[in-house]
Amino acid sequence: MPRFFVPSQQILRGDGGYTVTVRGDDAHHIAHSLRMAVGDGVVICPSDGPDAGRVEYHCRLTLFSSAEVIAEAGAEDVHSCRTEPPYAACLYVALSKADKMETVIQKAVECGVGKIIPFVSSRCIARPGDGEAKKQLRRQKIAAEAAKQCGRGRIPDVCTPISYADMLKEAVGADLPLFFYEGEGTVPLSVLLARQPAVPAKIALVVGAEGGFSPEEVDAARAAGLIPAGLGTRILRCETAPVYALSCLSYAYELPRGEADAPNSTE
């Protein structure tokens, strides 16, 4: 079923169920682009509040108007969200050209990222400019569309770019702060994940731009307490490395282990 995100205040609890109001572009999309009708099913997820990423409402459309669409769900139609990872992964990605940045956002959302924070490093080709606010809106929209497409329970935030120094201060606060680069002295990501006694609650992934990091930036990351991590022997593009790293996290912490744990296994 098509999936939409609405503010929690538009999900009202009544006798025996819930009434959901969908407004704006999503309401227009339901009524005109998808040509849905009364009785058709949609999945509604709260975009904020304590239930964001935790529950989803399997609704039936009940009313169309010029500005909004109403959907209803019974108490039995409220389900736990099963598409969010058991960790909060924050991707700190060096600012890159628009097309590459948009690709990273889209694929990172599909791979389970919790938040995306661009930063500026010395070798970034792209730089924040006067049109940054407009770019920010587009990036967040890309994240929202990717979340709908892949069945996420929440829309990851895409933040405005920050400085390299601020990135280091934020990233080091994670339970597992990973700094990816291709130089010497790194530990393979597989080894670092295997060393964890449990799934880290918060994981930071720092990935550079087209030209990588300068030696001074690498030294600063080490001094700040970030863990130099490697992604194998091949040199990955700046738009490939974040997706690869997030995929490794998903493989390590999300995929079932063995037939007994597989959702579709039979005894």
Image: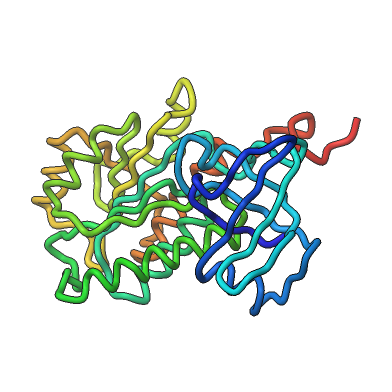
In the rendered image, the residue lying farthest to the top is 197
* Residue 153 in the figure: left or right of residue 234: right
Residue most toward the right? 267
Q: Residue at x 74, y 59 (%)?
A: 62
Where is residue 192? Give x, y as percent.
Answer: 40, 33
Q: Which residue is pictured at 28% across the width and 44% down the height?
A: 179
Please tell me which residue lies in front, 226 or 153.
153
| Left or right of residue 34, residue 122 in this image | left
Q: Quadrant of residue 93?
A: bottom left
Q: Quadrant of residue 233?
A: bottom left
x, y percentage for residue 247?
A: 51, 50
Identify which residue, 64 or 180, lies in the foreground: 64
How did the renderer colour the structure? rainbow
Task: Identify which residue is drawn at 28% across, 74% down.
Answer: 97
Describe residue 63's horizontal placement relative to residue 116 as left or right. right
Image side of residue 150 versus residue 239, left or right: right
Residue 259: x percent and y percent? 78, 34
The answer to which of 216 and 54 lies nearer the viewer is: 54
Q: Where is the C terminus found, in terms of image quarters?
A: top right
Image quadrant where one finds the N terminus: bottom right
Give the image quarter of residue 148: bottom right
How many tags in the picture? 0
Q: Position of residue 262 (x, y in %)?
A: 76, 36
Q: Residue furthest bottom?
A: 32
Is 188 rendered above or below residue 143? above
